[in-house]
Image (cartoon, rainbow, N blue to C red):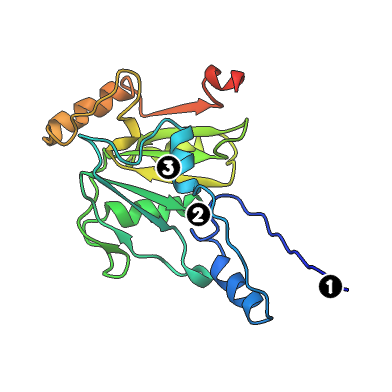
Amino acid sequence: MTVLLSIIQLKQGDPSVYGRAGEEVLYFRSRGLEPVVVPGVSSALAGPSFAGIPVTQRGVAESFVVCTGVGRQGREVKLPGYERGRTLIILMGVARLRQVLDTLLSETPDENSRDGVAYPPYTPIAIIERASMPDQRVVTSTLAHIGTALENSGEQRPPGMIVIGWSVFALWDSGDIEILDKCHAKDDEARVQKWLHGANWRVVEGFDHEWDEL
């Protein structure tokens, strides 16, 4: 009599993007079981989409980088420097937001904390909490004001992710997809003010009503 043993471990998103798929593959293989990994859609891509944020967009963002906000055993992670045409996505970094902001904005960072130039303080940023859930919340602001914005938005709703770059507001309302064509600092600050309607931040709860039909 042959006994078939099936072990299924269900994970959210892509198990290979800051998951433990690698350790688990090796664990089962060492015990004579060859695992099959079925990839999902990474939250790094799905989360921004639920918030109306494209990680790339012609005229705005030509590339994106995904990194974690905390290294193994709690170590600090080296973050990439500012590039106008790039979107930075930080997973598991909201709890260390102040440290992340200090690293990105510092003119004299520790050599092990950032690789590249500092981010302008008016750079758009979004914190997406509980993406795809009914209580999803998206807090958008600038690097200069996001800390205060989050503190004034009530209790945090983990899990959360951070999206930084001009793609954050590229599709908001009538949109702005000429970011890479117009790159003067004074123009950037004016377009940020237009995006936020003169405020320092915006909070969006839940989803657009179109999702109700789905």
Coordinates of residue 66 in the picture (x, y in percent):
38, 54
Q: Look at label 1 and name its amino acid.
A: Thr
Instruction: Specify whether 15 is left or right of 117.
Output: right
Coordinates of residue 95 in the picture (x, y in percent):
51, 52
| Distance Cα–Cα, label 2 vs label 1 | 44 Å
Q: In this view, does 212 lie above or below 158?
A: above
| Distance Cα–Cα, label 2 vs label 3 | 16 Å
Coordinates of residue 143 in the picture (x, y in percent):
33, 42
Q: Residue 156 carries which label?
A: none
Mark closer to the chain start, 3 or 1: 1
Q: Which mark is residue 2?
A: 1
Q: Which of 59 and 77 is in front in this view?
A: 59
Q: How crowded is mark 3: few (under 14 residues within 10 Å), some or many (20 or more)?
A: some
Q: Look at label 3 and name its amino acid.
A: Gly
Residue position marked by numbered label 2 in the rendering = 92
Instruction: Give the image quarter of residue 35.
Output: bottom right
* Residue sitting at the far front: 1
Q: Look at label 2 and name its amino acid.
A: Met
Q: Is residue 166 visible?
A: yes
Mark closer to the chain start, 2 or 1: 1
Instruction: Specify whether 48 is left or right of 118.
Output: right
Q: Can residue 153 be seen in this view?
A: no
Residue position marked by numbered label 3 in the rendering = 147
Q: Who's the residue at 61% across and 35% down the image?
A: 133
